[in-house]
Structure formats: C-alpha cells, structure tokens
Amino acid sequence: MPGDLVLEVRDLKTSFQLHKQDYRVLHGVSFEVARHETLCVVGESGCGKSVMTLSIMGLLPENATVQAQSIRLDGQELTALSPRQMNKVRGRKMGMIFQEPMTCLNPLLTIGRQMTEGLKLHLGLGKEEARRVALETLKQVGVSNPEERLRQYPFQLSGGLRQRVMIAMVLSLNPRLLIADEPTTALDVTIQKQVLLLLRQLKHQLDAGVLFITHDLGVVAEIADRVIVLYAGVKVEEGGVRQIFEQPAHPYTIGLLAAVPNIKSEGYTLSPIPGTPPNIAQAIEGCRFHPRCGRATDICREQAPALRALAPGHSAACHHLEVRP
Ligand code: SF4
C-alpha cells in the first residue's frame, strides 16, 4: 500500500431502527486509504456502499446507529467526536463529491459566494484571499473563464461544469480525504471521461487519499489503485486493481466482472448474477452470498466465511477459494 494512511476504519457496523426493530446494514467492515491512493468500493446497489461513506462522515439520520472499533482520519479518532466537532472535520478534512452537484450547490447563491464563504469559514481567509484561492482552484480543475463563473449561478452551468465546480470547492479546502460517491454516474460518457481524468491528475497533486464509491467496473478500471468489493454489508474481497480484474477470487467479484459488457470481444455473452442483494430485513445464515452462488455447499449455508489472504494485499471471504500456485 503506497504512502501513509489518511483513513483507517476498523469493524464498522451500522444498523437502522425501523418500526422498533434493529436492522444491520454493515456487518463489521474494515479498510484503509493511504495518501495519494484511490480506493474504490464496488458492489451492486443496496450492498451498503453509500451507508458506509455516510457512516464515516456522520451524516446518517437519527434512526441509524454507527459502531466501530475505530475510525481514524489523518490520525484523529472520529468515533469520540461530538456532532459539532464532526461538522468541523467534515468541512475541513473530508471533502465530498456526490453524483448530483446540485445537492451540494445552493441554487440561490453565485458560485463565487459559495466558494469564498467556505474558505472564509473553514480556513479563516479574508475576502480577497478567498477570491484568489477560488479562482486558482477553478483554473486547477480546468474551468474555463473562471472570473465569469464566479459571478454565475449553478443553473447557468452545464452538468459537467457544475461537477468541476463542486470538485474545485472541495479541493480549495485542501482536505486529507476526498470521498466521491458515484460522481460521474449522472454525466454523459465524454464528460465522465474528463472528470475521471481530472480526478486521476489531482490525486498526484493533492496531499490526500480518495475513497471512490461506484457500481461501475469500467470506472474502477480507470481510476482505482486498490479495490474492495462489498456484498450485503460485508467486505468479500480486497486487492490491487490488477489482482481484482485479472485474478478475481470471490464468486461475487467474478460474477460482477462477467456482467460487464465487453464490446471489444466478438460474440461476448453477458452473464448477470442471478437474483438481487438481500434487503435489510432479510436474515441470512452463513455466507451472505449463498442464495445467489452457484458454488454454495452446506458449509456456506451454515458458517460465514472469514477473509483469507491469497497473495500480498489480496484477500477474499469464501469457503471454496481456489488456491493459486
Ligand atoms: Fe459461494 Fe460458498 Fe464462497 Fe459464499 S462461501 S461465495 S456461498 S462458495
């Protein structure tokens, strides 16, 4: 793993109370993000990816309970912080980029006002300095006519430009961790490529790590250094991006890869994974993937498999892993 760690998560468990019943969504997930690396979290919708990031950021609703042995951001333990202290950490040390920039941009304020307010509040900059940093960051992320953009309102920008502005707003605060939750899903393919390229370039310029959430393996191939695969709230595989793509070990990872269209191969056949991830009310004994797994045997239905190391940096949780030479 490159560099030192900016995020360390140990045994993260998140539950929701619905109709006086507790339902667990994350079942003890652990991982790290190092400085200058992009860790992609993949899995189908409903596997707990977004709940995981919202748990780390402390942004879940009141009916959620987040427990963890430890969540350390840049050496600071977050589990002991009050909501007010978390608010400060979120603005300053964690930057968030969401799928829809309009969820973060205020439609009633100009881009300039929104960018400079954040810089004044979190970094204590004066008006002129905040404007200078805002302009510089807009240029850094490739926004054309930055002076004019500062005077514009979000509705006057295209979707791709709004996403760049949101990235600029986050970067201007120089966060230690950048959390990107499906940031390119709502963009068309050309703009998506540009934003991914931008994030790849920025990773090397920033003194930060990137936690990138996506269901799209094409995006993972373009941007990830390492990957964790989440299924029904459990980490089922972890490895370097080449290990995951070239030597996937867990049947769920293999299934995800087989379901990716490959227009380069003539006569390819799509093989979607049968069934859907369980909903939170569904209790499953043993391996949580067994109802959908073609390799399942009795032990799979009885015992949850532990993660096993396959190679340095590569591990998977399955009772029937094929041991590689
Ligand atoms: Fe499939 Fe069994 Fe492995 Fe689970 S433990 S992924 S059910 S083979």
Image (cartoon, rainbow, N blue to C red):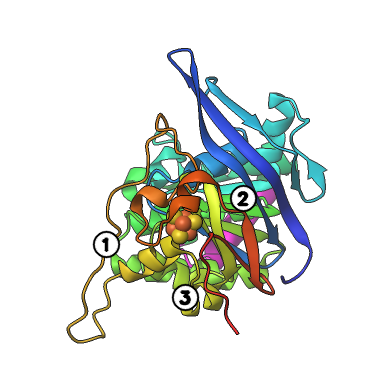
x, y percent for residue 224: 54, 69
Residue 213 seen in the current view: no
Magenta region: 129-145
Tell whether 124 sits left or right of 133: right
Q: Nearer the viewer, residue 140 or 239?
A: 239
Q: Is residue 273 above or below residue 154?
A: below
Residue 279, placed above or below residue 150:
above
| Mark 3 or mark 1, earlier in chain | 3
Q: Nearer the viewer, mark 1 or mark 2?
A: 1
Q: Is residue 108 above or below residue 210?
A: above
Q: Residue furthest right?
A: 75
Q: Nearer the viewer, mark 3 or mark 2?
A: 3
Which residue does the image show at 58% across and 51% down from the upper left?
170
Tell how many labels.
Answer: 3
Q: Mark 2 sits on what residue?
A: 131
The label shown at residue 272 is 1
Helix, strand or loop status at disc 2: helix
Work out how far the residue at label 3 is from the one at label 1, CA to CA, in angstroms: 17 Å
Under mark 2, the amino acid is Arg
Residue 245 has which mark? 3
Asked which secondary structure carries label 3, the reply is helix
Farthest left residue in view = 267
User: Disc 3 vs disc 1: which is toward the camera?
Assistant: 1
First in sequence: mark 1 vs mark 2: 2
Give the alpha-carbon distance from disc 1 to disc 2, as whole Å.
Answer: 50 Å
Where is residue 179 drawn, in percent x and y? 57, 51
The quarter of the image holding the C terminus is bottom right
Sequence-wise, which precedes: disc 3 or disc 2? 2
Disc 1, SS: loop
